Amino acid sequence: MQKIYLCLILASTLLSCSADDEKVSEVSILVANESLYDFKNVIVNSASGTKDFENIDSQDSSPYQVFESAYRYAFIELQIDGKTYTMQPIDYVGETPLEDGFYTYIINANDSQDQYGKLSLTLRND
């Protein structure tokens, strides 16, 4: 009889565990190129890792890619006409991670030839 009670307690404990406790956060981000330049080898590094967005033509956008977590800005590296340009965040101290959902990193490029001064980023909540 004690074995039956033990089995019932064990079964009810296992069944009370929920998959919600193991839910993985998903932030889907696409990159939109609002500049007059074609972007090559676009790489985005959020707090949870690096994703390759490949090539994005002028006035076009990439497909969404899923990140475990991300912020309103990120490390971005890309090439324009064979030259590498970078957006380098200092850190994410004080920043709040984006909530689960769909977002667009809108990237623009000015006429500067400065590796760290050419790109700008705007976040759009889709």
Image (cartoon, rainbow, N blue to C red):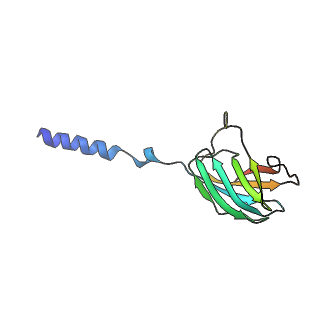
Q: Position of residue 92 (x, y in %)?
A: 67, 37
Q: Is residue 50 left or right of residue 12?
A: right
Q: Position of residue 13 (x, y in %)?
A: 29, 42
The residue most toward the right is: 111
Can residue 18 be seen at all in this image of the molecule? yes
Q: For the N terminus, which image quadrant?
A: top left
Quarter of image, res 61: bottom right
- Quick one: 121 or 110, which is closer to the camera? 110
Task: Relative to 44, say whether 8 is above or below.
Answer: above
Can residue 100 be seen at all in this image of the molecule? no
- The residue shown at (17%, 40%) is 5
The residue most toward the top is: 94
- Quick one: 32 or 115, which is closer to the camera? 115
- The residue shown at (30%, 45%) is 14
Quarter of image, res 3: top left
- Quick one: 111 or 71, which is closer to the camera? 111
The residue most toward the left is: 1
Task: Relative to 84, say whether 72 is above or below.
Answer: above
Q: Position of residue 16 (x, y in %)?
A: 34, 44
Q: For the C terminus, which image quadrant?
A: bottom right
Q: Is residue 31 left or right of residue 12?
A: right
- The residue shown at (73%, 62%) is 40
- How many marks the image carries: the answer is 0
Q: Position of residue 71 (x, y in %)?
A: 66, 44
